[in-house]
Image (cartoon, rainbow, N blue to C red):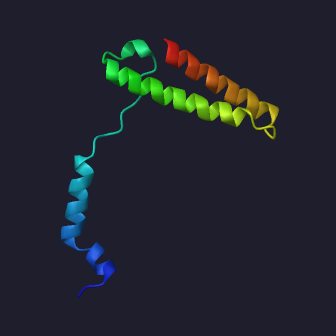
Amino acid sequence: MARNEERAQSMLNRFISMKNEEKRKPKERRPFLASECRDLAEADRWRSEILREIGVKVSEIQNEGLGEHRLRDINDEISKLLRERVY
């Protein structure tokens, strides 16, 4: 029986892994403005993603050990996400 390394390098396994990669959908980019989205389900998905990111940033901003520059950067990012969520 072949070793694991030899099995991983076999032509059949490389072909199967290549075919699996082709089946995957390309990663979608989030529209910058909500008005660019025409499908309600898709808009709701992007909105929930934005809300998740806002939640992560808010929890980061509550860290007392952050420097003032990083604090301002996170605040700017939150403001940008809030703008993106509304429009």
Please state the horizontal and vertical placement of residue 16, each as a whole percent of the image. 20, 62
Q: Is residue 32 above or below residue 26?
A: above
Compared across the picture, whether 76 is left or right of 29 comes to: right
Residue occupying image coordinates x 32% and y 80% = 4
Residue at 67 percent across and 35 percent down: it is 59
Image quadrant where residue 72 sits? top right
Please provide percent x and percent y for residue 85.
Answer: 51, 18
List x then y, in percent, for residue 28.
Answer: 36, 33
Q: Residue at x 30, y 18 (%)?
A: 39
Q: At 56% across and 15% down in the image, what residue appears?
A: 83
Total count of labels: 0
* 85 to the left or right of 66: left
Q: Quadrant of residue 65?
A: top right
Q: Which quadrant would the N terminus be assigned to in this image? A: bottom left
Q: Is residue 62 left or right of residue 26?
A: right
Percent of width and height locating residue 82 = 57, 19
Q: Residue furthest bottom?
A: 1
